[in-house]
Image (cartoon, rainbow, N blue to C red):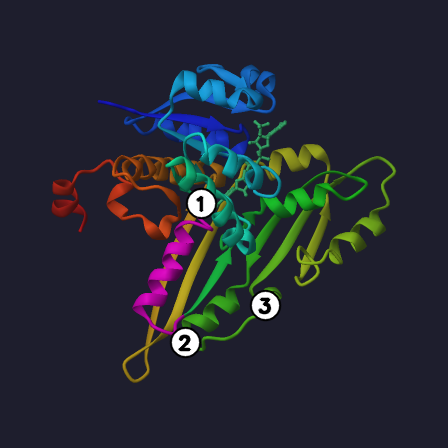
Amino acid sequence: MLKTKILLVGYGNVGRGVIKSIANNPDMELVGILSRSPERVKKEFNAVPVRAMTEAEAFISEIRPDVAILCGGSKDDLPKQGPVFAKLVNTVDSFDNHSRIPEYFKSVNDAALAAGHVSVISTGWDPGLFSLQRVLAGAFIPGARAYGFYGLGEKGGLSMGHSDALRTIPGVADARQFTHAVPEAIETIRRGENPVFQPGDMHTRECFVVLKPGADREKIVETIRSMPGYFAPYKTTINFVSQEELDSKYKGFPHDGLVIAAGSTGNGNQAQVEFRCIWGSNPEATGNVLVAHARAAVRLAAEGRKGAMTILDIPPSYFTQLDRDELLKHWM
Ligand SMILES: NC(=O)c1ccc[n+]([C@@H]2O[C@H](COP(=O)([O-])OP(=O)(O)OC[C@H]3O[C@@H](n4cnc5c(N)ncnc54)[C@H](OP(=O)(O)O)[C@@H]3O)[C@@H](O)[C@H]2O)c1
């Protein structure tokens, strides 16, 4: 079988998830890794050549990947790396800063069009799978309102962005933040009431914080509760724990979520669709979605397509290894 050659750009949680996913997809092959800290990566994983980000162009000419999966952070890395790599190779990324997707799309699209590459941006589960469900629901139930809930299970879902925000507070040694959906809010929608919610109506936030020696506990509580956007609009519980407790009880990257779209058909018959994801590991799940998009990106490029795209632009059969016969016989 001719395998799709994948270059990994950036080695963090999602990067590790992509490597595990490639191992589970027999038509995919990891051919190299680019990182700003190659020595760190080599200590953990050296089954393929690992090079410094500064050597990107030469490395790509040498290993000739079909597609690069960009696993840098959405806040600071991808806005720079996305357009740079779109000039060099077909790309896929999970840029998740929702409000900045239009400008990110434009910068990657300009670079990919000029170079004749395909760049699939902002995929994963949200944005990604959930975006697709919102759009499908809106098309099939005109006028539907779509809601997103995260952290439905007992432990809630680990929010990596909010955990990072806690760790920036002076006096905080380590922290993890679990998001909990408000069950009553979900029930209101399922009853067909279709309400307009404020962010704090739908989710609560639970923080587990390890303090540095001598840290001002009261000040940290105040800083967390008043952090705009992150915690200020939400009912927030703050627990101080030891590093050992944090590492043993709250490890891993579990997350889950639900899209519900609700509206009506005809003359007011209630209509709803729900799509739920449960992930034992958010970065591994995101890695799987990225690898399926890498397969699609290579197929689109082989058809001569170019420019930036999202999950909304790709036929579902392009994501799968299954052929048309199999899809028609068993998956329709
Ligand atoms: N769309 C979705 O559903 C979805 C879901 C999950 C995550 N995401 C996105 O994926 C992005 C990446 O998430 P992540 O959890 O993989 O972030 P992360 O672990 O912080 O990794 C981001 C980058 O930081 C560098 N890095 C990681 N660990 C490091 C360390 N110990 N020392 C020095 N540098 C290190 C790596 O780049 P270098 O190798 O170049 O140093 C890595 O590519 C997030 O920003 C998020 O936006 C999207």
The CA span between labels 3 and 2 is 17 Å
For residue 22, what is the image quadrant?
Answer: top left
Alpha carbon distance from label 1 to label 3: 37 Å
Residue 283 located left or right of residue 178: left
Instruction: Say which label, 3 or 2, has the lower sequence index.
Output: 2
Q: CA distance from mark 2 to mark 1?
A: 40 Å
Q: Label 2: state its secondary structure.
A: loop
Disc 1 marks which residue? 109
The residue positioned farthest toward the bottom in the image shown: 267
Residue 155 in view: no
State if disc 1 and disc 2 touch (CB < 8 Å): no
Which label sits on residue 201?
Answer: 3
Three-letter amino acid code at disc 3? Answer: Asp
* Mark 1 or 3, nearer chain start: 1
Q: Residues within 10 Å of mark 2 (few under 14, many from 20)?
A: some
Tell me: is circle 3 under 8 Å from ligand 1. no
| Mark 2 lies on residue | 192
Q: Nearer the viewer, residue 106 or 253?
A: 106
Q: Is residue 291 left or right of residue 13?
A: left
